[in-house]
Image (tube, rainbow, N blue to C red):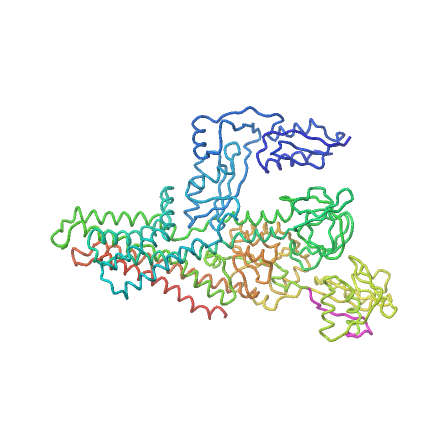
């Protein structure tokens, strides 16, 4: 007998627990309409007791590690309890329920957004904190995404506790992106604030008419505002970096701006108020470095937009039929097994199976193919695709997180999360450079103050001389050049690219794109134009080309099928006017039937021509077109087939040349398509691509990318559709066509604004040039510091009397910055060569 049943289940902590219970119970025959709720601690279903018993289901639940009765409370051990309570005050360990886990630990996953990370060492610091925390199974902190992915024990932690761990590491964590300010807004404010005060400071220094003491006090006030408003983020970052036993760029920057500022404060208040100070240098340092911070924040902010675009694809409402009545409800309210009606032209709200009706469905968001797919009762249908031609009734099979679209969203997010944070050369060097510079500065002070014994020759007090040498070392080693090395090159390089139709969304792309081994291409809309066009008109003997096209256009004018459009367009472009027909009837999945001057006229596939006379020559030609991967339309008049029209997605004019250039550069190519094998091979052969994978779904595309990556190759993926989004995210470099979907463009790291595949090779060349410039910038930054630090420390003073005062050290520091900026600007000369 079949009936509704419920079982109380204890120990479920999250949605993953619910899914685990459902997956286990679904294996039993005779069970339907299964749902689980960890909040209500209950699982409900309909069960045919002739196939499975309730006892069998209860045994399965116990085997999964859950309980059928509430469990006694069990407190954590005293030492561990106090630690967890201090990290997570919202939890009371004495009230946590314990559950047996015979099949191993059961954990929950959480992903959240993070604000305040500036470099790879920031993400490393957060990971270190989690790895030292009990109850954390796995940790992944993604710097480009500014997200954290944690697997935790729900017996010990809840979501708020996980976020508190991040906060204690010195960063802000939250679950909803809406809680965050717009990308780059904070950095933009700090930069504009610093700029608004730095410009007046420069004017006062060079054009002011105050005496030196008054000027210094004015500069002190303005520089203090810049230092502790715009520069506050550097100090906070340095504090938490050192607290977590790492040294990032914030530490270097804080040392540099502090050296100039606090030396000036010391000189103004304790030495001589009329003596030259370096308040303007400290303010300028902050202003210039904030430019890079602002650009970096804006670039990062674009990354998460792809997921928002994917979520926007879902239909807002659905027509649910219950008890014979149709009600429009939000699509999120549709439940499994609900019956939904979808009208022609509407977006399908859920994954399901067609119960009634036939239609053509635009599945381009899923497969990327421009041709609609015929759907009839019994066939599956995917949410977010578009019902083009007929009214259908479907039974909901998947909702929420279980739909195909939700799966694509997860793949995009997971692929982006799997990418290792980029280890910037400056951040790696900072772990060594910072302690070395501090050690040299302190050693310099100690040597001159305690060991040198040159009180008579230095001409000033030993303390002041020693302190000036120490400050000079810190100023000359200021990381301004290091901080500008990458952002200036990227800013100029990306500007050059944009002028030539190449949009680089992240700085890391310009580093990584030059190291590619293979480029994978989507077919439709990437290699090809993405829209069907008439390629061949083949009229029967005795029929002129113009007459045949006129008959075809007269019939297709009655059709709403997408393939009818290029036929009618071709006739109009050739100034051939279609004749008026009567009693037109569109037959779903076959074609259109009408009458022309009382004579039957048909246009459609070969099935529609059943019973009509088909000359052997036309039959042979139709098979030939099919072998070439083309779609055919047969035209029949008076029950006699009078010709065939072949349509195909035409290859872009520059596709073949682009592939040849990549091969010449030593880069392999491959074609990945959701289309059939014949069509994919035909396109590949025409453009010169050797390796082809056809009939590939989105989940298979991402696996194809992983397959090439597993061989140790650096992979680029070029695509234009939603179906390409997971593969674009998984690839080392995702390249999106500018005319493609917003999702592809947001997921891709490079956008080809002009839609030319020749720009793929140009982007690689520009990346190589930019990376070379960045390396040169770092060389000059380090070389300049290493050369000038000994002089600033006074190593040449005993023998030659040469040393650097803090004033000249500041000037020398700016020369290193100018050399870096100047070298980056030389990239502009590469713009003309880029179009070769």
Quadrant position of residue 782: bottom left
Q: Nearer the viewer, residue 202 or 88?
A: 202
- Considering every residue shown, the one lying at the far left of the view is 456
Give the magenta-colored segment's residue range. Answer: 532-546
Q: Position of residue 213 (x, y in %)?
A: 22, 58
| Residue 536 lies in the magenta-colored region | yes
Q: Position of residue 627 (x, y in %)?
A: 72, 61
Q: Is residue 340 left or right of residue 290?
A: right
Q: Is residue 452 left or right of residue 374?
A: left
Quadrant position of residue 597: bottom right
Q: Residue at x 75, y 70 (%)?
A: 537
- Considering every residue shown, the one lying at the far top of the view is 72
Q: Position of residue 233 (x, y in %)?
A: 38, 50
Is residue 801 positioned above or below 707 on the image?
A: below
| Residue 835 lies in the magenta-colored region | no
Is residue 96 positioned above or below 484 on the image?
A: above
Q: Nearer the viewer, residue 422 or 198?
A: 198
């Amino acid at each position: 007998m079949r009936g509704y049943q419920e079982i109380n289940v204890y120990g479920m902590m999250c949605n993953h627990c619910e899914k685990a219970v459902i997956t286990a119970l679904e294996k039993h025959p005779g069970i339907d309409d299964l749902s689980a709720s960890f909040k209500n601690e209950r699982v409900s279903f309909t069960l045919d007791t002739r196939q499975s018993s309730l006892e069998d289901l209860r045994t399965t639940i116990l085997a999964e590690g859950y309980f059928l009765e509430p469990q006694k409370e069990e407190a954590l051990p005293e030492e561990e309890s106090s630690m967890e309570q201090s990290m997570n005050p919202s939890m009371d360990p004495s009230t946590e329920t314990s559950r047996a886990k015979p099949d191993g630990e059961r954990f929950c996953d959480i992903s959240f957004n993070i604000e305040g990370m500036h470099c790879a060492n920031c993400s490393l610091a957060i990971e270190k904190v989690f790895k030292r925390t009990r109850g954390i199974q796995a940790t992944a902190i993604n710097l480009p995404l500014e997200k954290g992915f944690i697997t935790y024990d729900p017996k010990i932690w809840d979501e708020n506790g996980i976020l508190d761990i991040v906060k204690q590491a010195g960063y802000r964590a939250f679950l909803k992106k809406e809680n965050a300010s717009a990308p780059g807004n904070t950095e933009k404010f700090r930069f504009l604030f610093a700029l608004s005060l730095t410009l007046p400071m420069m004017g006062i220094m060079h054009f002011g008419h105050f005496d030196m003491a008054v000027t210094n006090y004015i500069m002190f006030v303005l520089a203090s505002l810049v230092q502790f408003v715009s520069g506050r983020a550097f100090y906070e970052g340095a504090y938490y970096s050192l607290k977590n036993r790492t040294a990032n760029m914030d530490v270097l920057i804080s040392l540099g701006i502090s050296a100039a500022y606090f030396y000036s404060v010391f000189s103004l208040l304790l030495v001589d108020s009329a003596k030259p100070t370096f308040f303007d240098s400290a303010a300028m340092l902050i202003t210039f470095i904030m430019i890079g911070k602002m650009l970096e924040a804006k670039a990062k902010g674009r990354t998460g937009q792809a997921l928002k675009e994917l979520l926007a694809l879902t239909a807002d409402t659905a027509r649910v039929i219950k008890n014979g009545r149709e009600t429009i409800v939000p699509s999120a309210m549709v439940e499994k097994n609900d019956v939904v009606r979808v009208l022609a032209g509407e977006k399908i709200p859920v994954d399901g199976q067609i119960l009634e009706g036939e239609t053509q469905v635009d599945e381009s968001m899923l497969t990327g193919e421009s041709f609609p797919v015929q759907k009839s009762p019994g066939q599956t249908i995917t949410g977010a695709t578009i019902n083009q031609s007929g009214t259908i009734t479907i039974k909901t099979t998947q909702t929420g997180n279980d739909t195909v679209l939700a799966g694509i969203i997860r793949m995009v997010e997971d692929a982006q999360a799997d990418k290792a944070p980029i280890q910037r050369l400056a951040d790696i060097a900072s772990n060594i450079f910072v302690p070395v510079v501090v050690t040299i500065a302190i050693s310099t002070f100690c040597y001159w103050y305690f060991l040198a014994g040159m009180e008579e020759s230095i001409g000033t007090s030993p303390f002041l001389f020693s302190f000036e040498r120490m400050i000079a070392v810190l100023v000359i080693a200021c990381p301004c050049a290091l901080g500008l090395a990458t952002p200036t090159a990227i800013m100029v390089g990306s500007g050059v690219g944009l002028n030539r139709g190449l949009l680089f969304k992240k700085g890391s792309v310009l580093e990584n794109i030059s190291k590619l081994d293979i480029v994978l291409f989507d077919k439709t809309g990437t290699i090809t134009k993405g829209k069907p066009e008439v390629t061949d008109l083949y009229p029967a003997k005795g029929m002129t080309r113009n007459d045949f096209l006129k008959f075809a256009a007269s019939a297709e004018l009655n059709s709403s099928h997408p393939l009818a459009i290029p036929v009618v367009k071709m006739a109009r472009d050739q100034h051939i006017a279609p004749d008026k027909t009567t009693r037109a009837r569109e037959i779903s999945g076959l074609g259109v039937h009408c009458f022309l001057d009382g004579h039957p006229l048909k246009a459609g596939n070969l099935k529609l021509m059943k019973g009509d006379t088909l000359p052997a020559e036309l039959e042979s030609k139709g098979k030939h077109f099919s072998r070439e991967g083309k779609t055919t339309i047969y035209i029949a008049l008076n029950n006699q087939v009078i010709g065939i029209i072949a349509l195909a997605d035409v290859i872009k004019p520059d596709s073949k040349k682009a592939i040849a250039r990549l091969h010449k550069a030593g880069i392999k190519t491959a074609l990945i398509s959701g289309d059939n094998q014949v069509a994919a091979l035909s396109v590949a052969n025409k453009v010169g691509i050797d390796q082809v994978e056809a009939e590939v779904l989105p989940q298979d595309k991402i696996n194809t990318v992983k397959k090439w990556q597993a061989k140790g190759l650096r992979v680029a993926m070029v695509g234009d559709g939603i179906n390409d989004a997971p593969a674009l995210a998984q690839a080392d470099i995702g390249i999106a066509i500018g005319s493609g979907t917003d999702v592809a463009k947001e997921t891709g790291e490079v956008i080809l604004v002009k839609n030319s595949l020749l720009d793929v090779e140009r982007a690689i060349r520009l990346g190589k040039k930019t990376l070379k410039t960045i390396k040169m910038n770092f060389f000059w930054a380090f070389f300049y510091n290493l050369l000038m630090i000994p002089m600033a420390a006074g190593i040449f003073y005993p023998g030659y009397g040469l040393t650097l005062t803090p004033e000249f050290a500041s000037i020398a520091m700016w020369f290193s910055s100018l050399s870096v900026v100047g070298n980056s600007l030389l990239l502009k000369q590469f713009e003309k060569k880029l179009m070769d």
